[in-house]
């Protein structure tokens, strides 16, 4: 698996932005097959930073309803990546 296939996109929510500003922790949607070691290596190579820790969270699909039809949301995997002191991802800030 290539490093650009592992990290799909950053999470751009208010809570994720607060984590980045206060705890130096960045949240990404990652490939469901990726493990913590692969995620760590991908973030370090893509953004040229040093990673302190990686926490992952599997999100199961949920049944939703829109008018008369039912559907399921897609299953996701989130990775919360804590960077070492002094490190920062400039492209994530905004």
Image (cartoon, rainbow, N blue to C red):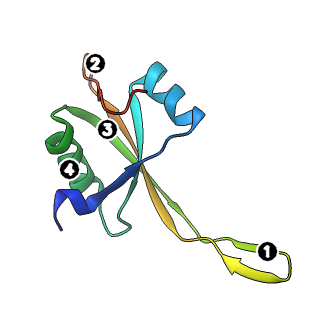
Q: Nearer the viewer, residue 85 or 66?
A: 66
Rounded to the nearest angstrom, the CA distance separating label 2 from label 4 is 19 Å
Q: Which type of secondary structure does the marked residue at label 2 adopt?
A: loop
Residue beneath disc 2 = 85
Per the image, label 4 sits on a secondary structure element best described as helix
Locate residue 30: give its quadrant. Answer: bottom left
- Sequence-first disc among 2 and 1: 1
Q: Position of residue 47 (x, y in %)?
A: 20, 37
Which residue is labeled 4 in the image? 42
For the point 21% across and 57% down, the residue is: 4
Question: Residue drawn 18% across and 57% down?
Answer: 3
In the rendered image, the quadrant that contains the N terminus is bottom left
The answer to which of marks 2 and 4 sits earlier in the sequence is 4
- Foreground label between 2 and 4: 4
Q: CA distance from mark 4 to mark 3?
A: 13 Å
Q: Which residue is mark 3?
A: 53
Mark 4 neighbour class, 10 Å CA radius: few under 14, some 14 to 19, many 20 or more: some
Judged by depth in the image, the label closer to the viewer, 4 or 3, is 4
* Position in image of residue 53 (x %, y %): 31, 38
**C-alpha gap between disc 2 and disc 1:** 44 Å
Which comes sooner in the sequence, label 1 or label 3? 3
Q: Quadrant of residue 44?
A: top left
Numbered badge on residue 65: 1
- Circles 2, 1 touching at the beta carbon (< 8 Å): no
């Amino acid at each position: 698996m290539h490093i650009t296939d592992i990290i799909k996109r950053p999470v751009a929510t208010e809570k994720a932005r607060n984590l980045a500003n206060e705890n130096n922790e960045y949240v990404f949607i990652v490939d469901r097959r990726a493990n913590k070691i692969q995620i760590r290596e991908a973030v370090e190579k893509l953004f040229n930073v040093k990673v302190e820790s990686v926490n992952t969270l599997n999100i199961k699909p949920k049944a939703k309803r829109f008018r008369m039809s039912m559907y399921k949301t897609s299953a996701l995997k989130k990775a919360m990546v804590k960077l070492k002191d002094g490190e920062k991802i400039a492209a994530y800030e905004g």
